[in-house]
Image: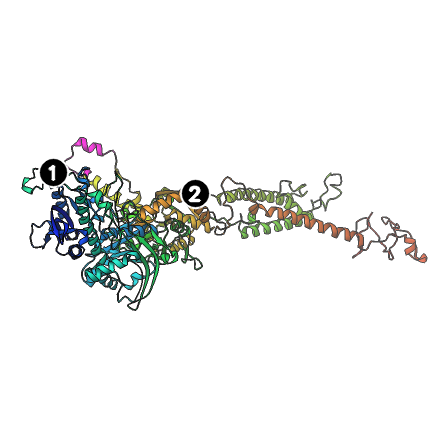
Amino acid sequence: MRDFNALLALTAIVAVLALFNSNVNGQTSQNINVLFINEIDNDPASKAVEVVETYLKKNAQYGLTLRIERIEANKTDAKDLLETSVASETVKSFTQALGLPTISASYGQEGDLRQWRDIDANKQKYLLQIMPPADIIPEVVRSIVRKMNITNAAILYDETFIMDHKYKSLLQNIQTRHVIARIAQGDRERTEEIEKLRNLDINNFFILGSLRTIGPVLEAVKSAYFQRNFAWHVITQDEGEIASKRDNATLMFLKPVVYAQRRERLGQLRTTYNLNEPPQIMTVFYFDLALRAFLTVRDMIQANAWPKDMIYMGCDDYQGENTPIRNLDLKEYFIKVNEPTSYGQFELVSEQGKPFNGYSYVKFEMDIDMVEIRGGNSVNSKPIGRWTAGLDTPLMIKDATAINNLTADTIYRVYTVLQAPFIMRDAKAPKGYKGYCIDLINEIAAIVHFDYTIQEVEDGKFGNMDENGHWNGVVKKLIDKQADIGLGSMSVMAEREIVIDYTVPYYDLVGITIMMQRPSAPSSLFKFLTVLETNVWLCILAAYFFTSFLMWIFDRWSPYSYQNNREKYKDDDEKREFNLKECLWFCMTSLTPQGGGEAPKNLSGRLVAATWWLFGFIIIASYTANLAAFLTVSRLDTPVESLDDLAKQYKILYAPLNGSSAMTYFERMANIEQMFYEIWKDLSLNDSLTPLERSKLAVWDYPVSDKYTKMWQAMQEAQLPANLEEAVARVRNSTSATGFAFLGDATDIRYLVMTNCDLQVVGEEFSRKPYAIAVQQGSHLKDQFNNAILTLLNKRQLEKLKEKWWKNDEIQAKCDKPEDQSDGISIENIGGVFIVIFVGIGMACITLLFEYWWYKYRKNPRIIDVTEAVPSGKRGKIPEGIILGRNEKHGNVKSNIVLRSRFNQYPSKTPKPRF
């Protein structure tokens, strides 16, 4: 790999091979043979070693003379170690095998140093590794991710950084999806690279590189990717500011800063020794490391800690286990060197028992600025904190507000389908929607920390697959990466799980059920009158008056009637005179259990009465039977009580929504039945079957049911509704005995029944499936949402949401209690009889008052002595049968003279006297 070669090319390894003494200007100088292994493109390391050599020559007080043997990779030899993927480890391998005291500036922590990972305690003293700044700077990404709770990240780097060994370790044990990639060459390639990363649902970007690389990368990014839901972090080893033609961008910028106490020394190296090779921090690091290594050897020589008779062996002499034993402690003296550094202090592990290699580095600081780029210029650079280089060191932030402004708002794209009470439009709601699922996603957002945009899918479907394997609805949006979350009453289906992922269910199992119009028998206080039609009542009334009138006529003109034979019937107990009033009363009471009383005396009248009795008996019996049946049968209008009942009848049409999961269920069940039927048919028509085998098949005429096949045919003939509104309209325009029944999701139907009094649920649910939130396949949201939903479940928040949206009095329709077959007759249907009796009592009271008034205030006749009424000259004998009397009531001014004959004949317009 070229990237790994870059890592090795940037690796500088100093091996001390031999020592010799010389006298320079009268001073004893320690001469050291050095093997310097470096790649030809690693200019900072080469420049640093050259400056160290010059620096030691000009500063004789150090007492060092170097003889350096350089090995550089020129990238032309195919067998060059530095061109292999394990070049650095190869160098470490032979330095360990040959026992060469070595100080390495190679990249990697303890686990990355495979050849030096398990070396013994003796070798740990002279095989040393110090991590360069370019290996420590990427650790700031880990600190930023932790500080800002970043859940996804794209880490792009150029040739100034080595990241191959950090793919696993950089964000290890942090729940952050991340991609580490080398920055592409060319503007078009960079744009495509950013687009690919964006398609992975990444909105946090880290750019590690030189300033000359950072500018073009920012310019290759679309303007939309600098909005609030994106975050950009720029990290460099260079000193200076960002130069970019970007129109509008706000980003976090991190660069190394020199300690104030080291600026003078660094300035001297730059001016006197021309130590200006960029990146400056790496060049100065190699200078300090090389100088410290050489001073370590000098100190060991002066302290007689360096063996004078050290024997070096060649590769040809090495036999696998004959590594020389070195009695020297290079690490101890390396740590003790008291030489000021030029950029940052070496952070060396000196404690016994703790590994030195992979944990030692140079300590420095990096400024953290918030940079605003407007119109191609950095218009504002605001310091917001600082980071001290190290392993797992936190950010030191002094402006928390600025950090919040640099944090990408995690905004997910939610697609949904309207379905009450899960998703409903509400212009007053923050997102324009309300419902069970809106409350649920808000609860999850509070736990996972994200925001979202929500919109309806164009075709209004959750997603079905056609014959060609193409999807529609919300599922298609998730497959095409146009949606992050599919929200709503979305059933978990096996075919959907092939292309998308589901969270744990957030709702109970929901199946398919039947919705029909509720049978409504209209209640009436005078329902007992509706038993017979109006023309029948009129005929009965006409018969009543006709019979009463006929009976009066017969009694008036019959010579055998009571009123025409008073003397004959004067000794009878019942002396009933059938005048018109009495005939009306007789016919009316004959229809009641009380009976009409004494019948007429004449035969003709009795025949009329008997005829009326027979007529009344038939009418009353018919009325009673019909009233009982009418009040009972009106509550038994339930022709369909289950799916089987619906399948067996032909009067009621039924169908699910076109394109719904219910339609898919019935269609597939019909196809399965047809498939099994074809298998059975092929088997039964197989001529190769023996008679015994055929007899075994003859037990069943049709071994598979055709229930769903017939139902699917009936649904197609009934025409499937295009939407829920059309289905409800068709149900309402029908009756429970004939019309239309809708098959759909039980939650849809239960909500419609809850909010409408004219609809009802029929039968039990079938094909039950849970509801869950849909996400893209492989999305990290699945695990996050699972944890959040389980948390809400444990806190009973989901139960509270059900209470809110399913038992809300504000949305529930106030319906009358449906009649039960076991209930008695309600007051609404029988209350008219009480009105009748109250009206009758009222009329009786009015009549009583009238009678009292008539009796008290009518003109009373005055009975006087005839002698007072007849003049004296005309007085004579009173005829027989004339009764004279005097009856004068006090207070009456006028009196009338009344004469009464034996035959009850009175003068016209003369009141009948009272006796």
Q: Residue at x 59, y 51 (%)?
A: 541
Q: Nearer the viewer, residue 568 or 788?
A: 788
Q: Secondary structure at mark 2?
A: loop
- How far across and how far down the image is residue 593, in percent? 62, 40
Q: Nearer the viewer, residue 337 or 526?
A: 337
Q: Residue at x 19, y 33 (%)?
A: 694
Q: Is residue 48 left or right of residue 380?
A: left
User: Is 694 one of the magenta-colored residues?
Assistant: yes
- Give how far apart the Cα atoms at labels 1 and 2 are: 70 Å
Label for residue 808? none
Label 1 crowd bin: few (<14), some (14–19), many (20+), radius 10 Å: some
- How far across and how far down the image is residue 39, in percent? 13, 53
Q: How many numbered discs sit on the rendered protein?
A: 2
Residue 631 in sight: yes
Which residues lie in the magenta part?
A: 683-699
Q: Which amino acid, mark 1?
A: Pro
Q: Nearer the viewer, residue 177 or 161?
A: 161
Between label 1 and label 2, give the one nearer the viewer: 1
- How far across and how far down the image is residue 393, in percent? 31, 49
Quadrant of res 428: bottom left
Q: Is residue 664 left or right of residue 76?
A: right
Q: Which residue is mark 2?
A: 796
Label 2 crowd bin: few (<14), some (14–19), many (20+), radius 10 Å: few
How does the figure colour the protein chain or chains? rainbow
Label for residue 324? 1
- Which comes before the other along the chain, label 1 or label 2? 1
Figure check: 625 above or below 10: above
